[in-house]
Image (cartoon, rainbow, N blue to C red):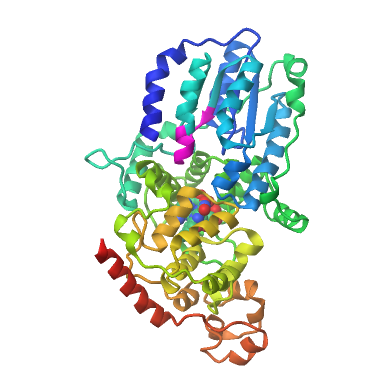
Amino acid sequence: PITTLERTIRETQGARDAIEVADNGCVVHWFKSDLRLRDNRALSLAADKARGAGVPLICVYLVSPQDFVAHLMAPVRVDFVLRNLGDLKRRLGELDVPLYVETVQKRRDVPGRLVELCGSWGARHVFCNMEYEVDELRREEGLTRMCLQQGIDFTVVHDTCVVEPGLLTTAAGGQMSVYSPWHRKWCAWLKEHPELLAEFEAPGRNPPVVRERYGEVLETPIPEAPPEKSLTNEEKERYARLWPVGEDEAHARLQKFILERIKAYHTNRNLPAGDHTSSLSAHLAAGTLAARTVVREAFRASGLKTITDDRQNGHMMWIGEVAWRDFYKHVLCGWPYICMGVAFKPEYNNIEWEYDDEKFRAWETGRTGYPLIDAAMRQCHEQAYMHNRVRMCVASFLAKDLMIDWRMGERWFMEHLIDGDFASNNGGWGFSASCGVDPQPYFRIFNPILQSEKFDEAGDYIRRWVPELRDVKGKAIHDPYGRGAEALARLRGYPRMIVDHKVARERCLRRYKEGIGRS
Ligand code: FAD
């Protein structure tokens, strides 16, 4: 789909370039997952166009409940998006830039409604940033043509990745599928093209005519979440406290992380207890912060001359993690079939999975009897977020210890995380279940107790999230029934392990070997 869209963009370029801004018209920016004013490529281009022609900039966001469902968006993520929209509308309002928000019930009606709105506002230019999921690429391809038929220039540009998909290729010109060499190329590309880190200018104030002409648009309220994606009042308050919205908040988080924690990121990043990572993923997913911005700021703060893959440097290590986000989006563009619920590696589609509801329920509720796994799942229920190390642990546990289809876990994550992002989530599950791009080998099976001892040595993370084990002393925290804290664990109602890791490991090796062998 991305090559089709790119071909359509090229083929229509001449005709679109010939379209002029109408007198008394306006220029439109269509917000999607780029809910920010600063460093937003398409918004900046739209503002530029409007300024050049002396017409207003109008922004639009079309709420599509079916999109929320199709993308398995967690209610907490829908709430985060809607709260951010409120902040965005307020900030744009300060510049007299209207943000028109409308709910379009059927996702297939979104393109038509966008074109209709442009018609009613006299807009002959619409700008937006590209999203790389298959449906979105197809939609934008259709929109390019549909707009042109109506005399509208629809401009869709790359923005969400630091280095756009398609530029870093193998010698044969194909998409790269192994992270390390890809990452070296990513660093080299940024060295050759430092302009890719330059900031896009935020829009300025609209001409005064806006208030008379688009007053109605200025007043549109932000809708409530659709019933199937709404939160309880208690949840709303909790998440509003935990995850404040807005790009100022996102920038403040970034600066605090750079000032206080990035330097030690390479040593502390794997420790789930404490505050060692940036917790910026929700903002990167909603687009309140651009990946380009965070890489630029971290690079600046590093004092280094170029970005490298030096894993002994906190700044570079962190930039390398942000690069994983680019990597998985590139992979999605290169192999769009991963959107269709199949493994990146076809031979991994033949593994025999268990569909054991009781075990899945134990996993999702944090009652597996493995303290680290349970702590992580309970953190997710409370905060809609999990640390990367424990994401890997719970994913590996579901797929390899329980032999439950990794796609059930992938889906559960999307439906519960505030930072749910198809490409990163699919990549993370593919890595952990060994079915994805550049995965850990299938015979590498995390031992959940060893992971716990290694990354939560003192048990602080477990004690925080598993209150039944709060009073367990010493190493027994990692395995209360096996290490002498049985009486306390039983008294407090903490469950016994639902599988024996050693036995589960053997079963997993057998099943993976058989599955791969069958293809
Ligand atoms: P930091 O450590 O501060 O990293 C900075 C940023 O780099 C992150 O915000 C994120 O945008 C990016 N990043 C870091 N690690 C990765 C990674 N392994 N893959 C891709 N991007 C990365 N991340 C999501 O944003 N959305 C998801 O839905 C998601 N699902 C995951 C599922 C599994 C099974 C696994 C193993 C990982 C998943 N990740 C996902 C990646 C990672 O766990 C989170 O991005 C990270 O924990 C967010 O915390 P942070 O912002 O403090 O990260």
Comparing 120 with 57, the one in front is 120
Q: Indicate whether residue 184 is drawn in magenta.
A: no
Q: Quadrant of the N terminus?
A: top left
Q: Residue 424's x, y, as percent?
A: 46, 51
* Depicted 241 relative to depicted 130: above or below: below
Rendered residue at 58%/75% (across/down): 367
Q: Residue 497's x, y, as percent?
A: 52, 82
Rendered residue at 49%/61% (across/down): 408
* Depicted 86 relative to depicted 25: above or below: below
Position of 390 compared to 85: left or right?
left
* Depicted 487 relative to depicted 249: above or below: below
Q: Residue 79's x, y, as percent?
A: 68, 48
Asked whether residue 80 is in view, the answer is yes
Q: Quadrant of the C terminus?
A: bottom left
Image quarter of residue 248: top right
Q: Residue 467's x, y, as percent?
A: 67, 77
Q: How many marks?
A: 0
Of all residues, the one furthest to the top in this rendering is 23
Image quarter of residue 516: bottom left
Rendered residue at 39%/82% (across/down): 503
Comparing 143 with 309, the one in front is 143
Please report the bounds of the magenta region as a residue range: 128-138
Position of 431 compared to 54: left or right?
left
Asked whether residue 263 is in view, the answer is no
Q: Indicate whether residue 134 is drawn in magenta.
A: yes
Of all residues, the one furthest to the left in this rendering is 172
